[in-house]
Image (tube, helix red, strand yellow):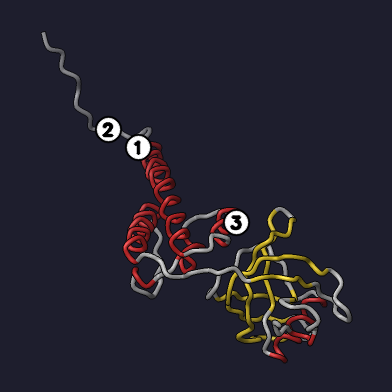
Amino acid sequence: MHQICGGYLAMTNFIPIFPLGIVVYPHEEVNLHIFEPRYKQLINECHETGHFFGIPTVIENKLQDYGTLVSITEITTVHENGEMDIKTVGDKVFRILEVITQVPDKLYSGAIVNYPNNPEQGSPEVMRKVMSSLRELYKLLKVSKDFKKQDEELQSYDVAHHVGFTIEEEYELLHLLHERQRQEYLKRHLIKVLPLIAEMENLKEKIKLNGHFKNLSSFNFDF
């Protein structure tokens, strides 16, 4: 039986849920501002007991099947009106089997979930290729980012928010349940997007040159 906050233990693998329009990955640190009464109750109970809650993804106002179990690492600020700023960290991916909209004596909703097997052992060589392509992308975009790990030590979850995915693509990666699949997904995305960005940069340079004096060689007719 899975321990949850608030002492609601009647169902195996029941978790309170906090649906959000974001994708949270395992091991990711996420800062949240809590202002709704139902979620203030959820956070207070989980903080007091040390238990977990789930953040399932919402896309186009529709609750998706997959999300990530998270724990509260710190309540950084409690405002006078009871609103809170909190720090959380992702634990593992879950899949919703059934949503429980009315939880006895609670303002928040919950879900019956399972935790799919999710091997996190990938290919260091593929990850090096992914990071090489990502740095090429950053060079084109003139941005920089320090991931604070060696390339071969990085996992797909470490970089998935930093490759230009849409939320739909971030969610698709969330329910790829093997690290090698996720690495390949990242690699294919970068292979697709790099030529597009390079062409955009070329276009920008052409636009900048338009209207300027150009030093061009003339065409020689051969007679």
Q: Which mark is residue 167?
A: 3
206 is higher (above) or lower (below) than 76: above
Single out the mark in the foreground, 1 or 3.
Answer: 3
Determine contact: label 1, label 3, CB under 8 Å.
Answer: no
Residue 181 location (% of width, % of height): 46, 58
Of mark 2 and mark 3, the one earlier in the sequence is 3
5 is higher (above) or lower (below) than 212: below
Residue at (65% x, 81% y) in the render: 86
Which quadrant holds the N terminus?
bottom right
Residue 198 location (% of width, % of height): 37, 44
Of mark 1 and mark 3, the one earlier in the sequence is 3
**Tag 2 residue:** 214
Spot the residue most to the top: 223
Query: Hey, what amino acid is under mark 2?
Result: Lys
Residue at (15% x, 17% y) in the render: 220
**Element under disc 3:** helix
Determine contact: label 1, label 2, CB under 8 Å.
Answer: yes
Query: Hey, what amino acid is under mark 1?
Result: Leu
**Tag 1 residue:** 209
Separation of residues labelled 1 and 2 (CA atoms): 8 Å
Residue at (72% x, 91% y) in the render: 48
